[in-house]
Image (spheres, helix red, strand yellow):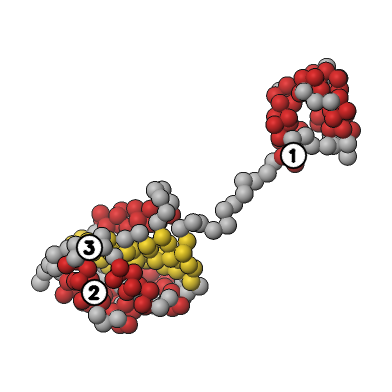
Amino acid sequence: MSNERLRAAMAAGGWTYATFAEKTEVDPKSVERWVNQGRVPRRATAMKAAEALGGDVHALWPALRQARAARAVSPELVALYDRRADVPVSRYTDLFAQAREHIDVLVYAAVFLHEAYPRLNDLLRERAAQGCSVRIALGDADSENVRQRGEEERFGHGIESRCRLALMHYRPLVGVPGIEIRTYGTTLYNSLYRADDQLLVNAHIWGANAFAAPVWHLRRNGDGGVFDTYAQSFDAVWATATPVQEE
């Protein structure tokens, strides 16, 4: 199949096979094949030819219009779980137990942690006593966004009750050095469970309860990656949250 766009562009510029070959530093027979047989030159040569013609290289040779290859897997992705229910509770607690600097939890309630691991508060106290900063952000049961989430997940007012229950679970930690509990009213797009440079992200899906939504396990791999994006999101929500006071 001939390349009529290239033929027209050469004719408009008064180029012959010989003069265009000299300009692009190829054999005249190569130029003839580009025109009459639709051959595609190497990218560097095509760029030089397009510049000489004052045209768009992709208009002259559409085959050179290639999408950038997508990276199949992020180097920060450790594991992907189809549902939160598939993640063993030991995965959360083991990560927390290994933390030395940061434990951050951003949820509306996530009472499953205390229900499945009654020693959670003791574990967080131990980590804080070893110098680990612990920040727990819980949904404000009276906020409009929590109420709306209950409607979207067909959970009704149950989610508000679970937010209050979560606060009851964590309240004994209020005032413990190194631990801070806050409540917030923003939309929760993802629940986050961070332990130093590792992070479990429970993505939320409209109309589905969190236990049925996927979880990805990330490990930080340099600055500016996916891990940092979620960590910055936590900080942004934390800045809007209200500290829980001792009773």
Q: Which residue is mark 1?
A: 62
Q: Residue at x 25, y 60 (%)?
A: 101
Q: Which tag, 3 or 1, sits closer to the chain's start?
A: 1
Q: Which residue is mark 3?
A: 132
Q: Which tag, 3 or 2, sits closer to the chain's start?
A: 2
Image coordinates of residue 102 in percent, x first then y, are 27, 61
| Residue type, label 1 | Pro
103 relative to 233, above or below: below
Image coordinates of residue 168 in percent, x first then y, are 21, 77
Q: Which residue is mark 2?
A: 123
Judge the density around disc 2: few (<14), some (14-19), many (≥20) Cα neighbours within 10 Å: some
| Residue type, label 2 | Leu
Image quadrant where one finds the N terminus: top right
Mark 2 and mark 1: Cα distance apart in space: 60 Å
Judge the density around disc 1: few (<14), some (14-19), many (≥20) Cα neighbours within 10 Å: few
| Residue type, label 3 | Cys
Residue 33 or 53: which is nearer the viewer? 33
**What element does badge 3 sit on?**
loop
41 relative to 228, above or below: above
Choose top left, top right, bottom left or bottom right for residue 115.
bottom left
**What element does badge 1 sit on?**
helix
Dots 3, 1 in contact, CB < 8 A = no
Image quadrant where one finds the C terminus: bottom left
